[in-house]
Image (cartoon, rainbow, N blue to C red):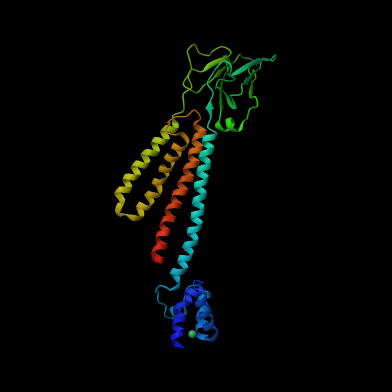
Amino acid sequence: MRKECNIIGDLLPLYTEKMVCKDTEDFVKEHLETCEECRKAYEQMSKSGSQTETEKRDGTAKKNEAAPLLNLKRKLRKQKIMTVVCTCLFVIALLVSAIAALTAPVYVPYDEELFTITEHADESITITFDERVTDYVCSSDAHIGWEGVAPCYEIEAWSTLWDKWFGRNEARFVVIDKVTGEDFSVYYVSNDGSENKCIYGEPITSGGVITLPRLVLGNYFLLAVLCTAVLFIVWLITRKNEPVRTWITRILLYPVSYCIGHVIVMGFRPSSYSAQRDFLFIVFLSVVIYGGVMLGRSVYRERKEIKEITGK
Ligand SMILES: [Zn+2]
């Protein structure tokens, strides 16, 4: 019986983890029914999960037989979850990119048929756009309400791929009230580098006014590239210091993700007329990309570890 007990002893960790074939399972079960000593060992093992009676007794820190198996099981489960999350992040990044592209404003340049202006008896006006325009903003300058300074409004109008493809053709119009009793002027901003067009009231300047694209995103992009370069140099220098290097890698991946986000949203354009919107998209995308890359890294590492354990 002693020899069989030894064999059972070897098999118990696997048996406890249900990692044995049917025949082995039957064999162990049969033995446990007849052998008191092995049954105790089995009960102990399934209770504590990993520690065996003997090890507890002599208190050695020697690695348990079952520990790597438990570890492996845990790792496999973790790997599965991380792979799923990674895939989800990838899909989210793809969706956000698509939404960013579909809703990017395509500004409608000025032409005379773009809108009609109706003047009302109370001196307010209504500007009605034609069907090329699906959205607009009307912003007023800082001088609204200043005595002696004529208020000035700026209108930008655009359409998006989404609106073009999925049709939103209701007529768009904007009503501008006479606020201060002062005459006001309205400019149309084409956002294509051409001069802003005074479409109502007296021009506020004798010369032309051009609304420039916001360069701020280009600056952020350059900053991200610079950070990447500096961190990369630090990464090269710290080749021998593994913990520092791990941290540098973690930090380094963010500016890289930001650059990728920028290129996805903006292409290689440095400037934007809708900088705020584009910036939000870039930041959101870069966070998703960063999460995906970090997860991908650990999935790769875990896979390597699992390979080492299983020897495959
Ligand atoms: Zn036995």
Place of residue 34 in the rendered image (x, y in percent of width and height, measured from the top left) = 54, 86
Q: Quadrant of residue 55?
A: bottom left
Foreground of the two, 241 or 99? 99
Q: Is any part of residue 149 visible from this angle?
A: no
**Outermost residue, front direction?**
23
The image position of residue 9, as x and y in percent, is 46, 80
How many numbered markers are drawn? 0
Residue extending furthest right? 121
> In terms of image quadrants, where is residue 72?
bottom left
**Which residue is located at x 44 percent, y 49 percent?**
293
Answer with left or right where residue 64 lies relative to residue 125: left
Across and down, in percent, residue 140 comes to: 57, 22
The percent coordinates of residue 236 (x first, y second) are 30, 48
**In this picture, is 89 found above or below 78?**
above
**Which residue corresponds to the image point at 38% horizontal and 49% vertical from the top-left?**
249
Q: Is residue 53 above or below residue 124?
A: below
Q: Residue at x 58, y 26 (%)?
A: 136
Q: Do we see residue 277 in this rendering?
A: yes
In this view of the protein, which residue sits in the foreground, 15 or 48?
15
Relative to 30, 180 lies left or right: right
Quadrant where the C terminus sits is bottom left
Q: From the viewer's perspective, is 148 left or right of 215?
A: right
